[in-house]
Amino acid sequence: MSDDQLTFQDPVTRFPDITPPEQDQPEPGLDADLVPQTDRGEDSYRGTGRLEGRRALITGADSGIGAAVAIAFAREGADVALSYLPAEEEDAQHIRRVIEESGRTALLLPGDLSDPGHCTQVVEDAASGLGGLDAVVNNAGRQIAIERIEDLEDDQWAHTYDVNIRAIYRISRAALRHLAPGSTIVNTTSIQAYNPSAHLLDYASTKAAINNFTKGLGQQLAPRGIRVNAVAPGPIWTPLQVSDGQPKDALPEFGKSTPLGRAGQPTELAPAYVFLTSAESSYVIGETLNVNGGTPSP
Ligand code: NAD
Ligand code: MG
């Protein structure tokens, strides 16, 4: 790709307008088995030293958006601890290789964030393994579509809340003893926080909670020099969508109703996380940066 192509591109056609076939993977899905494959920036993300020397913990960093953020952070000069589920080892090893080929450290921390003890452990392991911690990206999430509230069971509700919002609270709290002024927390919320789908009652309500939590904690930590922000993706092609995140018949149309007319690729999210983590966003706090292909949001 020439420099011209990188710096001046039509967003409608920069990435293909995909029509994914109906497919199913057990939760959590793997990028390795996704059809079509996604762009996480392996071949395209070019860093400019914006996160030089930073030490970041990224949850859900094996695949999808988190993997794209991990690659971007490494290319920007950060060392990265990757949190993911043990079943995702194949995806995590791929991202580890990409980070190491970028000349940075990748620390692999498999485990289940619905376990409160693991939320604390992953922070401690990241800080000791990276020699400190000054950036956290709370990106892990689960999304299981259930058509009728009568079929939405207590266990499913509690599990979604544990992974999507309680883990953010637990990891943020545990990380504070390591975070010096200048450190950042970026949480992954969703367009679902404002435009909930009828079949995502548990998931969408956690995303609204994440937006609210981000604004509250952002105010609390600002005087301590620690900034908290969020990124709200729209429809991004990732394994989340094929491991029951969407009804199967919705997959071919995924993302086509956005103003841009196509689903987003994970690498298109990465610059938002880089911006909110780098010192250049020093006056941005409690903000939710929407990266959604043009759907209006509050
Ligand atoms: P993904 O499946 O690639 O990433 C989600 C990750 O969450 C998994 O890789 C897994 O490592 C992690 N995870 C799930 N359950 C876990 C658990 N119990 N313990 C530890 N880790 C666990 O999919 P993605 O779409 O890249 O999702 C990343 C974030 O983006 C999620 O918070 C999701 O809600 C959010 N999001 C995605 C979209 C989209 O369209 N893909 C849109 C809005 C928001
Ligand atoms: Mg994954």
Image (spheres, helix red, strand yellow):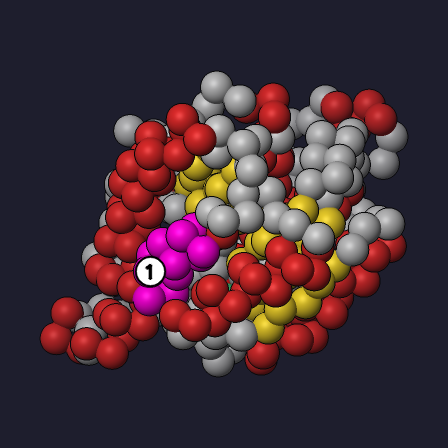
Quadrant position of the N terminus in the picture: top right
Q: Name the residue: 44% across, 36% down.
A: 228
**In the image shown, does 73 or 44 lie closer to the viewer?**
73
Task: Tell how many labels.
Answer: 1
Q: Is residue 50 magenta?
A: no
Q: Name the residue: 43% across, 51% down.
A: 172
Q: Is residue 277 left or right of residue 211?
A: right
Q: Is residue 84 left or right of residue 214?
A: right
**In the image shown, does 202 or 200 lie closer to the viewer?**
202
Q: Is residue 214 left or right of residue 106?
A: left
Label 1: few (<14), some (14–19) or many (≥20) C-alpha neighbours in 10 Å: many
Q: Name the residue: 56% across, 62% down.
A: 124
| Start-end of magenta stretch | 162-174
Q: Position of residue 210 (x, y in %)?
A: 33, 47
Q: Position of residue 43 (x, y in %)?
A: 80, 47
Q: Is residue 254 visible?
A: no
- Helix, strand or loop: magenta stretch: helix
Instruction: Name, please, the residue furthest toward the top.
Output: 283
Instruction: Name, please, the residue furthest toward the front.
Output: 177
Does dot 1 land on a helix, a strand or a loop? helix
**In the image shown, does 66 or 227 lie closer to the viewer?**
227
Location of residue 106 with respect to 104 vertically, above or below: below
Q: Position of residue 113 (x, y in %)?
A: 45, 69
Instruction: Name, please, the residue furthest toward the left.
Output: 150
Location of residue 101 with respect to 3 vertically, above or below: below
Which kind of residue does numbered mark 1 sit on?
Arg
Residue picked out by circle 1: 166
Location of residue 99 with respect to 78 vertically, above or below: below
Q: Name the residue: 83% across, 57% down.
A: 100
Quadrant position of the C terminus in the picture: top left
